[in-house]
Image (cartoon, rainbow, N blue to C red):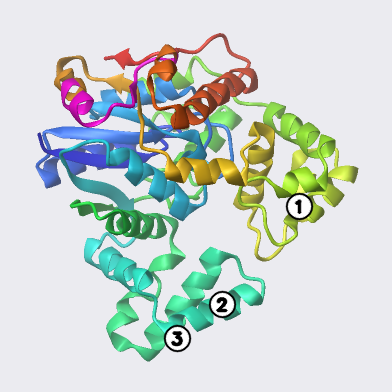
Amino acid sequence: MKITAIIAEYNPLTNGHALHLKRAREETGADTVLVVMSGSFTQRGEAAIADKYMRAEQAVYAGADIVVELPTIYAISPADNFAYGAVKTISAFADVHYISFGSECGDVGKIEKLADLLLNEPAEFSAVLKAALKNGSSFPKARAEALKSYAAAHPEYDGLKDVLDYPNNSLGVAYVMAVKKAGLDIAFHTVRRVGGSYDSTDIDCEYPSATAVRLAFKRGETEKLQNAVPKSVMGMLSVISPQGDTLGDMELFKLKSISGYELENYYDVSGGIHNRLKIAANDAHDIGTLLENAKTKNYTMARLKRIALYALLDITKKDWEDAVNAPPYVNILALRKERKDILSMLSMGCKNVLTRYSDVSRVDKSLRRFVKLDYLTQGTLEIINRSGMFAKKMLLI
């Protein structure tokens, strides 16, 4: 079996994603396409537009053979930890030959060269990075600044100086670094991103971003969506409703009700941000105002949204440490009917495989907290989407 893995959110799956799935299979010569997909919440600390089983179903329709869940604790983490969790999940599969990802540069050689530089960070690079962080820059901006400075003094890296200015490039670098740190024998493949950028709101370009699709969906621009997503995804969108402010209200209540000391213990909270969040929470009447008032130069809005979500879900620093020390597990969301052979192959290499919630009692005890978190967040999304009960077991498609 020759597997190509793709790490995704598909929030929702767009025509650009479908093109990537097609090219990844063709250009890597894969007989199996594995998708590791975020579940109920995304890397920017937001609720997914639709249930993970519905989105996994669309991925199979678009060309995936199997879709497994990226565990929640990784799916809502900063980029490097997001990549770590995705690669850890992929490591449960024995025959992964490639990881394929979209990138703005479209040059896998550049991505790998930059990953090698960051894994063996030169002293002068580190010095600029530390200085930028000390001056209040967020880590992504500080690292991009350090790269530009280093490339200016080292012409052989001049072609890389702008790579970290783009989010898909940065994620690609994180995937390569995670694979190399794990010592896995996996090659890389990239497809150049075309159309709207990752965060573009232009719904009228050839391949609009998922961000643009979500905004158009919220505005009710159905006709424009028809040119942005596959027909099956249009069918999915027709049976769900735009989300209201329920998640923000839940997060606001939690942040108002806990102490600064409790908040300090949550995952990725450092540098006194818990005090700013508590002060902002005292007077805020909505989550948007709270986060805007707490924001600083070195705390991006995405990071603050994730912290609010960690508080809501009680994800602590210790939880992250426990997740790192635990073995990988695979929660299968959707599988192509004629590819049940993948299950046999997977069961031989990984003992922690789930196809439904009741399987939680069969996995390693160190994993049960994280599996339960995956299903807790699914229940939370049901409340946010004001929906009936979602699927609770693997879909055969």
Who's the residue at 60% across and 25% down the image?
A: 242
Q: Is residue 279 shown above or below 245? A: below
Q: Hey, which quadrant is residue 3 in on the image? A: top left
Report the number of numbered marks. 3
Q: Is residue 206 left or right of residue 126?
A: left
Q: Nearer the viewer, residue 270 or 218?
A: 270
Q: Residue 55 at x, y = what percent?
A: 40, 25
Q: Earlier in the sequence, mark 2 or mark 3?
A: 3
Query: Between marks 2 and 1, how big is the CA–CA gap?
Result: 22 Å
Residue located beneath label 1 in the image: 274
Residue located beneath label 3 in the image: 124
Query: Is residue 193 among the parts visible in the rendering?
Result: no
Q: Nearer the viewer, residue 187 or 168?
A: 187
Query: Is residue 354 among the parts visible in the rendering?
Result: yes
Name the secondary structure under disc 2: helix
Q: Nearer the viewer, residue 367 or 356?
A: 367
Residue 366 located within the stretch drawn in magenta: no
Who's the residue at 66% across and 77% down the image?
A: 135
Do residues under tags 3 and 1 come within 8 Å of each other at their CB atoms? no
Do residues under tags 2 and 3 come within 8 Å of each other at their CB atoms? no
Residue located beneath label 2 in the image: 130
Q: Residue 165 at x, y = what percent?
A: 45, 66
Query: Between marks 3 and 1, how big is the CA–CA gap?
Result: 32 Å
The kind of residue on which mark 3 rests is: Glu
Span of residues in magenta: 344-357
Q: Is residue 287 left or right of residue 189?
A: right
Who's the residue at 26% across and 14% down the image?
A: 397
Q: Is residue 248 shown above or below 356? A: below
Q: Is residue 246 left or right of residue 20?
A: right
The kind of residue on which mark 1 rests is: His
